[in-house]
Amino acid sequence: MDRRDFLKSGAVGLAASTFGLPRRALGAPLPGGTLNPTRIRKYVTPLAMLPAMPVTLTGGIDYYQIAVRQFQQQILPSGMPGTTVWSYGSVNHSESFQYPARTIEARVNRPVRVKWINGLVDGSGGFLPHLLPVDPTLHWANPPGPRDMHSEFQTTPGPYRGPVPMVTHLHGAHSTQESDGFPEAWYLPAAGNIPDGFYRVGSKYDEFKQEFESKWGNPWTPGSAVFQYANDQRPTTLWYHDHSLGMTRANVYAGPAGFYLIRDSEELRVNLPGPGPARGDAQGTRYYEIPIVIQDRSFNADGSLFYPDSRVFFDKFRGPYIPDSDMPPIWNPEVFGNTMVVNGGTWPVLDVEPRLYRFRFLNACNSRFLILKVVANPLAARPVPAALPILQIGADGGFLPRPATLPQLLMGPAERADVVVDFAGLTPGTEVYLINEAPDEPFGGGLVGDDFPAADPGTTGQVMKFRVVPLTTPDRSANPANLRSLPGFSPLPSPVRLRTLSLNEEDSDVLAGVGPRAAKLGILDGGGMPQGLEWMADVTENPRFAETETWELYNFTADAHPIHVHMVQFEIVNRQGLITDAEGMSEPPARLVGDPIPPEAGERGTKDTVIAYPGQVTRIKAKFDIRGLFVWHCHILEHEDNEMMRPYRVG
């Protein structure tokens, strides 16, 4: 049976009580900040385009100097307060700083080199503290020391207020280790007031600095790192964001993220809708290929970003916290904003002509899954019938083997979808809406209305509006729905090794009825029992160079997890039902049931992020063809930051 039948059969609920973790039913979005989202006017702000990032120097390679800075932007509608955010921009082009960041345009096999600069300093050169609360009790970068470790506390600490670590990861890139954005390769800004005794760089920074400089000769200077991307992969949609150990959730929520698009002549042959934003565009250029970043955020009445400063936000647990228990005082297992932000604006509107449009969607939410539909009535009872189909032509790793026509689009955090929507049948004046039917709570799979309540139709259930305007020029692009295949996909070699890995959630060791306190990745031991491992445990995944492996991801938790493996683009092999026994009273404690379920149509290319559902084992196949140290992790950023990330080493 297919996954829809599998989910309807109820098998996905078999993991709901694993390790005593009940399915969390949080209902409507939890209150966030002092700005009521229903007071934010919808569909009054035009969708912002994301221009191409200006290049600093071009020749045999494209060289960029890109910094993260703090500035104010109008995210809420005009007439409401501005919002202080962080984001990337070219240091040579002050106008290029915007949230989300501008798009880096790259070509297949043409290298890009970027000097990534931590520019979080004020006008006098002093460091800027974080905009949001950072929990110093986690295993994190920890500039005060011990570096990249836990700290010991005599009393429950407040948020960290020191200089902010940064290190940029190009998500989905076929990168060498020194350019991958390893979480322990962070660096502080080159500020003049770093406190004595603070570590200015992470524990891996100097090693990777030496490796890069020995290869390329481009020196790393204080407050920065230089990375090189070979772009030796298929044309696709990547994105870049911060990846600092134990604080990625707060850094990314503050703003630093942007698209990185790799192109080549294959796209020209398909004759897809275009153009998209490019360097040197004339003002007023009409775009028919549009990158779209979807995020959920909450705001305060003064326009500032809201992010919870206490565990109370998640489950009303008021302590005792560390050091009087093992519960972090600030970290939340998941965070759901009550406002949808698209390309840096709340609930925008896009004028579309009656023709084909290509959208590159990115789910850049911290924790929220998305189920996207194009509908006629955004306030209709869920599920809402689709008004227009979504034609998916690409996923994380590039074009699919063949186009997939879908009534809706499921996207976990960090997943990308390259899609075409045909507005040709709509008359000018028609309005249709992009809505979200995924829940305002942790997602576990299933069907809206049957297995989970849809997002609030008045707030997080709406994303943006499309308003049809008259056609300006004939549409000469080809409809890829007529293609039997798309260019460029070739299957990976047969695997030579199988690894059995586990996804785990842990309750407090000292407090009854409270949890979870952490999420972990791990292995299955010889008896089939999961062993959750912390970040600092010895490497257990060590593929040989250039070999292909199958990884089986056994989900022992109550939630779906978007699992990201750095450096590789993998294939999803299949999924299979899983019955687990947390107490180990049966043989074996994890038992497979039913037939394997093939990947869905939109998952049949190559990917770097896969949704691992509860009550299932998810199998992926990858070729590990760059030697070095990398990571794999859950891309629910709150999970990643609290132990649900592991290093792996190739070679």
Image (cartoon, rainbow, N blue to C red):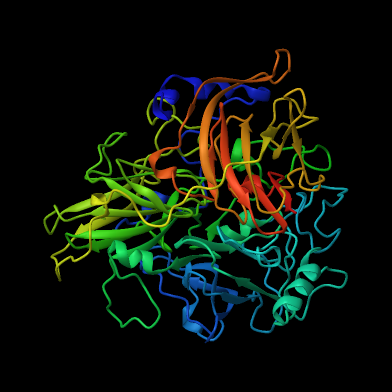
Give coordinates of residue 20: x percent, y percent.
Answer: 66, 23
Q: Work out whether 528 lies above or below 103.
A: above
Question: Within the image, what quadrant is residue 630 found in?
Answer: bottom right
Residue nearer the viewer, 527 or 559 = 527
Count of marks placed on residues: 0
Residue 270: in sight, yes or no?
A: yes
- Residue 619 placement, left or right of 100: right
Residue nearer the viewer, 279 or 222 = 279
- Residue 21 placement, left or right of 271: right
Q: Residue at x 82, y 72 (%)?
A: 195
Residue 44: in sight, yes or no?
A: no
Q: Residue at x 80, y 57 (%)?
A: 148
Residue nearer the viewer, 393 or 224 = 393
Give coordinates of residue 378: x percent, y percent.
Answer: 27, 44
Give coordinates of residue 533: x percent, y percent.
Answer: 76, 39
- Residue 634 placement, left or right of 596: right
- Residue 112 placement, left or right of 160: left
Q: Work out whether 211 lies above or below 333.
A: below
Residue nearer the viewer, 491 or 48 = 491
The quadrant in which the C terminus is found is bottom right
The quadrant in which the N terminus is found is top left
Q: Residue at x 64, y 44 (%)?
A: 639
Give coordinates of residue 360: x percent, y percent.
Answer: 39, 58
Q: Residue furthest left?
A: 427
